[in-house]
Image (tube, grey):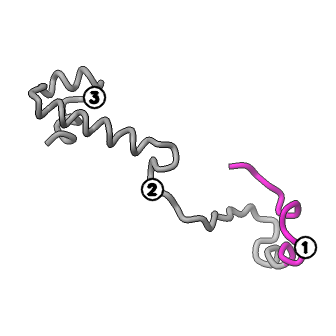
């Protein structure tokens, strides 16, 4: 997150009002946009959904937890949580 001087972006009247409440303190102003869930913005969620779907398919085709662990670089316990 980048620091921006409020005086550079806020109208003078609004700056005066904000100063009454914050007077020199550093403020964080959250966005009013709707929040997106984890991984929606950068595609991570879709990547893991597809990876897990493929992992379940391979498990149902007979791959063992050991084999899947080696293929995906995850522990057997993590694989077990995904496929079972």
Residue drawn at point x = 88 percent, y = 78 percent: 13
Q: Residues within 10 Å of mark 1 (few under 14, many from 20)?
A: few
Upstream in sequence: badge 1 or badge 3: 1
x and y percent of residue 10 in the render?
A: 84, 68
Task: Please say if 84 is above or below 62.
Answer: below
Contact between marks 1 and 2 (CB within 8 A): the answer is no
Q: Which residue is mark 1?
A: 12
Q: Which one is in front in this view, the residue at disc 1 or the one at disc 2? A: 2
Q: Is residue 14 magenta?
A: yes
Contact between marks 2 and 3 (CB within 8 A): the answer is no
Q: Is residue 13 magenta?
A: yes
Residue drawn at point x = 32 percent, y = 43 percent: 49
**What are the residue bounds of the magenta stretch?**
1-16
Residue drawn at point x = 21 percent, y = 41 percent: 82
SS at circle 1 = helix
Q: Which residue is mark 2?
A: 37
Q: Residues within 10 Å of mark 3 (few under 14, many from 20)?
A: few
Q: Which one is in front in this view, the residue at disc 2 or the one at disc 3? A: 2
Task: Please say if 1 is above or below 22.
Answer: above
- Which quarter shows the C terminus? top left
Upstream in sequence: badge 2 or badge 3: 2
SS at circle 2 = loop
In this view, the residue in front, 26 or 44, is: 44
Disc 1/disc 3 C-alpha distance (Å): 55 Å
Q: Which residue is mark 3?
A: 74
């Amino acid at each position: 997150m980048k620091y921006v001087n409020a005086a550079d972006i806020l109208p003078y009247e609004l700056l005066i009002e904000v100063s009454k409440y914050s007077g020199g303190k550093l403020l964080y102003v959250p966005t009013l946009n709707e929040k997106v869930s984890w991984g929606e913005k950068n595609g991570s969620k879709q990547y893991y959904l597809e990876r897990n779907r493929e992992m379940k398919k391979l498990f149902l085709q007979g791959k063992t937890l050991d084999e899947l662990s080696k293929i995906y670089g995850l522990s057997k316990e993590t694989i077990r949580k995904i496929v079972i």
